[in-house]
Image (cartoon, rainbow, N blue to C red):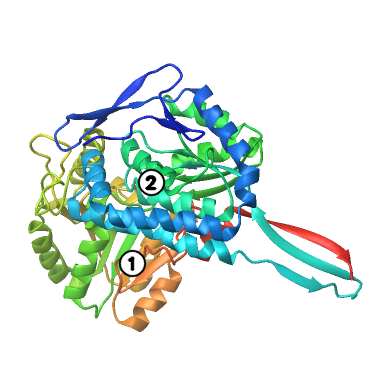
Amino acid sequence: MTYLNDLFIDGAWRPGADERRFPVIDPADGSELTTFAVATESDCLDAVAASERALPAWSATPPRERSELLRRCYEILAAEEQTMTDIIVSENGKAHADALAEARYAREFFRWFAEEAVRIGGDFRLSPAGDKRITVTRQAIGVSVLITPWNFPAAMATRKIAPALAAGCTVVLKPASETPLTAAYVIGVLERAGAPSGVVNLVTPAPTAPAVRAMLHHPAVRKLSFTGSTEVGRLLLHEAADNVISSSMELGGNAPFVVLEGADVADSVAGAMVAKMRNGGSACTAANRFYVHTSVLEEFSTELTAAMSRVRTGPGHDPDNDLGALVSVTERDKVAALVDAAVDGGARVVLGGTARGAGAFYPPTVLADVTHGSEITRTEIFGPVITLIGFDDPADAIRMANDTIYGLIAYVYGPPGDAMTVALAIDAGMVGVNRAVLSDPAAPFGGMKQSGLGREGSAEGIEEFLEEKYIGSPA
């Protein structure tokens, strides 16, 4: 396969200023797919400058024209879904089914925000005294720096690019170094769809921190949208504070999965398999901590272990495999270390628990007798590992579910009334009640506490890239 593997700045593909390149690795076998251009700090500032030059014309472009550009992107991605799927599998390692699902999910953001671009609202009112008109309009916030992770390299890019462009902003995309090829493919689609020069730009700096810092201190940058770890998010917020840059943050998660007394065990297990194993567990929405009522714990554990044992593991390009590789050996080793520490602390391995063979693979794993508060219950696992913890009182389940700095998403299975009561008591921006997948372009995605700021998707997603302007005039 031939890949786009250079920077994209001001409408042109180009190498970095110092012509350095870094390898892009297939995590399934460790082979080199290609090399990608390294962006210098000056390249990143060139991208910001190009965005600044393009902003006036793009923000003044009629909403319908912006909408049609996004719609063309959707149509190209729909026609080429297998191409994107293959690129995602190659550099990310995930299973073919997961990559195909992401390709379809990613393109939906272009369709959704093509429709939102023409619905940007405003307000008009008369002052209480009746002597003034109050007009409120919304305009593009400005040049936006978008930073995306490796776990959903297509969807996280489109979920940011689409609303930004719909709002009239211009963007600089900085993808994860593990998965730059998917990002370059998305940018290539935008180029083919007719995005004007400077409206979208792609940079891959190494080292990352100094270049991002330089961009966030450029006076033209007015928006930062970041998806990644809470630790990095904190650092970026410090940098953004110097120029008072509006910041949207989708940060870490540590999702509880609560199974109540009276829950349908078969339905709960089916939900658990989706909530945990979607994307191989490498998702901020992945269920990490399974709190199961003791009345159903044994049955749930038995059926869940059986379901996990049926998961087929192997290279993602084989559509018969359910679980692909993690993105790197480094990530695999992080998961292995968490499991080993849990076992040392008294957890019992019911299934899996040991990485074998070549490649960044980790087997489907079930741990029982896990202690709430142990490291594995405080850490975002990002792998195919289930931790089982029993409870007797729903109040204890709520307490344990909320005993974390994170609050992105939670899942509750049980009788509808009881499940809704527990859902309302859990501190999370999203809660699935007898439902295992909540991600939807039409729904506001985001968390509470240290899981982030702002929302992506839905009508709220475009508002992150708009500023309100109040214009007063005599009545």
Mark before the other along the chain sequence, 2 or 1: 2
| Residue type at tag 1 | Tyr
Q: Can residue 57 be spotted in the picture?
A: yes
Residue identifier under label 1: 411
Q: Quadrant of residue 30?
A: top left
Residue 232 location (% of width, % of height): 46, 38
Q: How many marks?
A: 2
Residue 393 location (% of width, % of height): 32, 73
Please tell me whether mark 2 or mark 1 is closer to you in this view.
2
Q: Quadrant of residue 420?
A: bottom left
Residue 134 location (% of width, % of height): 81, 67
Give the alpha-carbon distance from disc 2 to disc 1, as whole Å: 36 Å
Q: Is residue 38 left or right of residue 200?
A: left
Residue identifier under label 2: 189
Question: Considering the numbered disc 2 on the image, is that residue within a helix, a strand or a loop?
Answer: helix
Q: Residues within 10 Å of mark 1 (few under 14, many from 20)?
A: many
Q: Is residue 239 above or below residue 429?
A: above
Q: Residues within 10 Å of mark 2 (few under 14, many from 20)?
A: some
Residue 15 location (% of width, % of height): 40, 23
Quadrant position of the N terminus in the picture: top left
Quadrant position of the C terminus in the picture: bottom right
Question: Considering the numbered disc 1 on the image, is that residue within a helix, a strand or a loop?
Answer: strand
| Residue type at tag 2 | Val
Q: Residue at x 50, y 49 (%)?
A: 249
Query: In front here: 239 or 50?
Result: 50
Q: Can residue 286 be spotted in the picture?
A: no
Q: Which mark is residue 71?
A: none
Q: Residue at x 16, y 69 (%)?
A: 300
Q: Is residue 417 above or below residue 346?
A: below
